[in-house]
Each structure stands twice: as structure tokens, then as C-alpha cells.
Image (cartoon, rainbow, N blue to C red):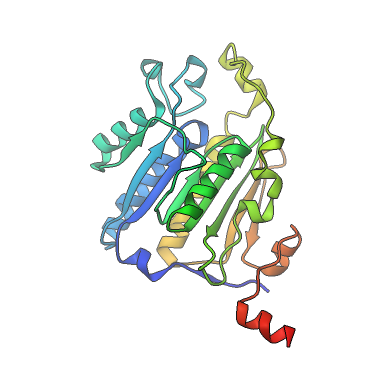
Amino acid sequence: MTMTHHIPDSMLEYAWRVVVVGAGGTGSALLPNLARLHHAMLELGHPGGIECIVFDDDTVSETNVGRQGFYPNDVGQFKATLLVNRLNALMGTRWVAQTRRVASTDRLDCDLAVGCVDTRAARKAILGAVGRGSGGYYLDCGNETDKGQVILGQVGSKIAQRLPHVGDLFPDLVNPKGDTVDTAPSCSMADALRKQSLIINQAIGVQAFNLLWTLFRTGTLKYSGVFVNLEAGRTNPLPVDPAAWARFGYQPKQPAARRRAKKK
């Protein structure tokens, strides 16, 4: 049975503390939309909009131009710093860039962490950092050649009836053993495009944007994820439904009181 997820009341009372990890393909597509969401929230009476920190240790390469949100004059500059400075100048935000990765020992105190990363190790590090921090939402944005997923979940043992995160539903996606070693850069944009659709990052970014907009605008969600298949021209939602989660092998943990009652 499909349920309805409600945004915590506190997220309507102060600025959302958002951490975006990854400013490459999907990150550079999502960040301008996140700035638009910030502006819309303020216009609709939210008291603080979005306060954002962006993590990425990579610099813009020639093969990023055209495929990601960068231009020829951007080559050689840090992606996080470049995008944050650009958005701060255009939108009047005061966002912050960190030119490093999120480490496995970090602690993230935020309401929402967004992962725009392409390795399992990076996902695991983000989830661990959010768990060591205050807990909150984790929005995973992942993609392959022309397919991908956007999954909004929650991290934290004290959250009642929490949404399962990507690691709950797809444990393999947070297992670093599944990462392949590919350190050779693409020699040209044409070579990069043979490996990945020109559209997939924007498609994933739009779905993530829509999830966050719906969560803010209505305060509720009836679905917490979307699977995108560009080859088939299809998107499939992931409903907020334990039966749907069970198809991925996930069973919500029962409250302690109910577990004790069953033991008796």
C-alpha cells in the first residue's frame, strides 16, 4: 500500500543545510536547479532557502566541455569553486566550495546530502559521513551509459519510519569491491560520448530537482525515487511502499516495542 512521506517540520522553519558531493556531469546539471529552488523557496515565504556546500577535488578538462556544465574558458579550474562562484554571482547566494572529496572519516551535519558520484566507495563515504553527523536525507544520483536512478532516503537510527536509502535497496551500489579501475582519461569528447549519453546527466538532474521541488512545495512525497531509461524512453517511480521496497530485498526494521511484544 502506497504511503505518504512528510517533510520534517523543522525544514520549513530554517534554511536547508545541503551538501552536494560531486560537481561533474550530474552535479553541474543539478546545482543551477538547486539555486533556482533556493530562489523559489524564498519567494514562497521560506525563511532561509538553501545553504549549500559543494565538494569536488576535480578540475575541468577539455572533454568535460559540452558534456558537463562547463565552457572552454573553464578548463583547468576547480569544478566546485567555479560553479559555486558563478552561482553566487548570478543568484546572490553565499554557497561554499570545498576542493576535496568527502572522506570516510568525515562528519556531515546537514539536512540533505546529495551524491553525484560515480563510485561505490564515494557513496559509502557519504552515507558514513551523514550517519556520523546529524543524520538526514541522502539523495543519490547515479547513472551509467543511458540509464540511471534517483533515490531519496534517510540516514539515522532515530528517524521513525524512515525512507530507505540507496544502500538499503541496492547494497551492491555501496560496496567498494564492485568498483572498476579506469584511470585513463577520454582522449576526446567524441570518445567520451561513445561511453555515455549526452543527455543522461541532465535527465538525472531534472528528476532529482523535481523530487526536491515536490517535497518542498507540497511537503509530501508519494514516491521517493525514479529510474530513468533513455534507450527505452521510460521513467519508473519508486513508490513509498513497503511492498515495493520488499521487491529489492529491504524490510523496514520494526520499532523496539513491537519486537519485544512479539517475543512475548
Where residue 176 sits: x, y (%)?
Answer: 66, 38
Where residue 111 sits: x, y (%)?
Answer: 41, 57
Above or below, 88 against 159 in this view is above
Which of 119/142 is in front? 119
Q: Is residue 169 left or right of residue 94?
A: right
Where residue 232 sits: x, y (%)?
Answer: 72, 41
Q: Which residue reaches farthest top?
A: 187
Q: Residue at x 30, y 66 (%)?
A: 13
Task: Answer whether residue 238 is visible to the viewer in this image.
Answer: yes
Task: Answer whether residue 207 is visible to the viewer in this image.
Answer: no
Which of 242/209 is in front? 242
Which of 112/28 is in front? 112
Q: Looking at the rendering, which quadrant does residue 189 occupy?
A: top right
Q: Residue at x 66, y 35 (%)?
A: 146
Where residue 17 sits: x, y (%)?
Answer: 36, 53
Q: Is residue 96 left or right of residue 106?
A: left
Q: Residue at x 62, y 29 (%)?
A: 197
Above or below, 100 against 218 in this view is above
Which of 39/27 is in front? 27
Task: Count up the numbered dots.
Answer: 0
- Split into 4 quadrants, where in the image is the N terminus? bottom right
- Split into 4 quadrants, where in the image is the C terminus? bottom right
